[in-house]
Every structure is written in structure tokens, then in C-alpha cells.
Image (tube, helix red, strand yellow):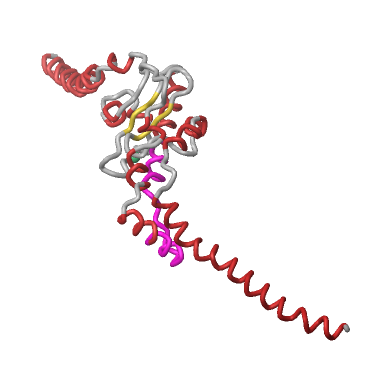
């Protein structure tokens, strides 16, 4: 009998220490910070609509122009490099899907906004809903949400790549986003470099044809007369 009690006590103790870390983990994650309604800005922050990645790649630097030319040469060769923002937007969609899963399972989100800590901390209540886990495309990537996630009109974005350009939120503010972009970007310069000779070539051909037709005209008149 004494042996049985001893064994039972041991089993209970083992179970207790197995369960305890799980409880501690849940209790350790402080959600109170995330349960405050984020302040709504009257203007959508630039880092969402025209983020650092595009500000850097649009600027008219020699390096950017060379990169643009190289990417066109690679395109002709059949090599297609997926830009880092493509992958980042894919990861943002993973986070949105995770939030949808959590909402479906728990009827309401227990927080109003997310950041990297809430996404990547294994003790976070959102962690288990994120599958596959969203990865960062670059070292500069950092995920956030804008607006109140428990309401409408919010979005997930990356501080380096901004919000998904094909997403509903970005399309709603597309006008504002294009106003933030400069008139001439490295992309536009390279397009001009490619198409300007072609544009000059067309009037030259037209002039040559015109001259040729003018020369032909008198002889036609003579044969008619
Ligand atoms: Zn990113």
C-alpha cells in the first residue's frame, strides 16, 4: 500500500511538472499591451503606402539604374528573380490567414494589433494559428498591423516593404500611394533609355518613306500623261 502511494505521488509530481511549463508559458505572455485600440491616423503612414524599400529602389542613383538594366538583361535571358517584396507580401498573407483561423476558432481576436513579438513568440496565443510560419524575406522586414484588427479597414504590413499592393487595403489608398512616388524613378529612366531610340527611329523611317514616295510621284505623273 505504501509502495502504491509512493508511486502515485511520483506520477502526480511528474504530471504536475509536465503541465506546469505550459501554464507558465500562457501566463507569461502579457496580452494587455495588445488590447488597447490603436490610435487612428488621419493620413496613412508613408511606411505602409510608400515604404523604405521602394524609396531606395526608385531613387535616381547609378546603382539603381544599373540594377534595372541588369534585371532587363536577365529577363531577356529568361532568368527571373522574384523581388523580395513578392515574398514579403506572401508572408503577410500568411499572417492574415492565421488571424482568420483564430477568429473562426475563438469567435473574436483577443488583441487589437500585432507586431513581431506577438507573431513569433511561441507563447503568444496567435502562434499556433500561424502555419506555415511567416518568414522574413530580408533582415529589414518587421511585421505590424495598422488599424484595429477587431474592427474593419485594418491591414498587415512590413515596415520595409509596406502593405501588399494587391491587397484590398492598398488598392483603397492607391491614389495616395502614387502621389507619394516621385515623378521619375530609376525604372522610368531605364524605360526611357530603351524606348527613346525607338521613338526617334519612327519619325526617321517616316521621313525616308515620305522622300521615297515624293521621288516616285513625278514619274507616275509622266506615265499617266
Ligand atoms: Zn518585408
Residue 41 at x, y percent in the picture: 39, 20
Lateral position of residue 204 relative to residue 144, left or right = right
| Ligand 1 visible in quadrant | top left
- At 38% from the left and 44% from the top, the residue drawn is 85
Whole-percent x and y of residue 67?
35, 57
Quarter location, residue 105: top left
Q: What kind of secondary structure does the magenta stretch mostly adopt? A: helix
Q: Which residues are magenta?
A: 70-92
Quarter holding the N terminus? top left
Above or below residue 40? Residue 219 is: below
The percent position of residue 90, horizontal first and vertical second, equals 42, 41
Observer-nearest residue: 140 or 193? 193
Residues 43 and 2: in front is 43
Judge by depth and name the residue closer to the eye, 144 or 106.
Answer: 144
Quarter the C terminus occupies: bottom right
In-image side of 161 versus 22 (left or right): right
Q: Is residue 199 above or below residue 32?
A: below
Amino acid at each position: 500500500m505504501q509502495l502504491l502511494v509512493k508511486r502515485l505521488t511520483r506520477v502526480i509530481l511528474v504530471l504536475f511538472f509536465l503541465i506546469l511549463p505550459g501554464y507558465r508559458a500562457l501566463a507569461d505572455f502579457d496580452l494587455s499591451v495588445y488590447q488597447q485600440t490603436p490610435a487612428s491616423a488621419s493620413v496613412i503612414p508613408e511606411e505602409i503606402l510608400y515604404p523604405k524599400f521602394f524609396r531606395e529602389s526608385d531613387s535616381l542613383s547609378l546603382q539603381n539604374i544599373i540594377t534595372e538594366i541588369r534585371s532587363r538583361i536577365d529577363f531577356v535571358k529568361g532568368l527571373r528573380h522574384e523581388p523580395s517584396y513578392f515574398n514579403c507580401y506572401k508572408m503577410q498573407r500568411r499572417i492574415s490567414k492565421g488571424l482568420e483561423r483564430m477568429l473562426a476558432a475563438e469567435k473574436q481576436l483577443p488583441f487589437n494589433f500585432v507586431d513581431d513579438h506577438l507573431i513569433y513568440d511561441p507563447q503568444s496565443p496567435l502562434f499556433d494559428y500561424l502555419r506555415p510560419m511567416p518568414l522574413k524575406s530580408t533582415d529589414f522586414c518587421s511585421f505590424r498591423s495598422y488599424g484595429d484588427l477587431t474592427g474593419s479597414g485594418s491591414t498587415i504590413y512590413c515596415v520595409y516593404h509596406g502593405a501588399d499592393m494587391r491587397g484590398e487595403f492598398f488598392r483603397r489608398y492607391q491614389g495616395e500611394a502614387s502621389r507619394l512616388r516621385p515623378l521619375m524613378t530609376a525604372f522610368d529612366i531605364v524605360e526611357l533609355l530603351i524606348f527613346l531610340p525607338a521613338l526617334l527611329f519612327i519619325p526617321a523611317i517616316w521621313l525616308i518613306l515620305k522622300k521615297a514616295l515624293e521621288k516616285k510621284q513625278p514619274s507616275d505623273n509622266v506615265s499617266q500623261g
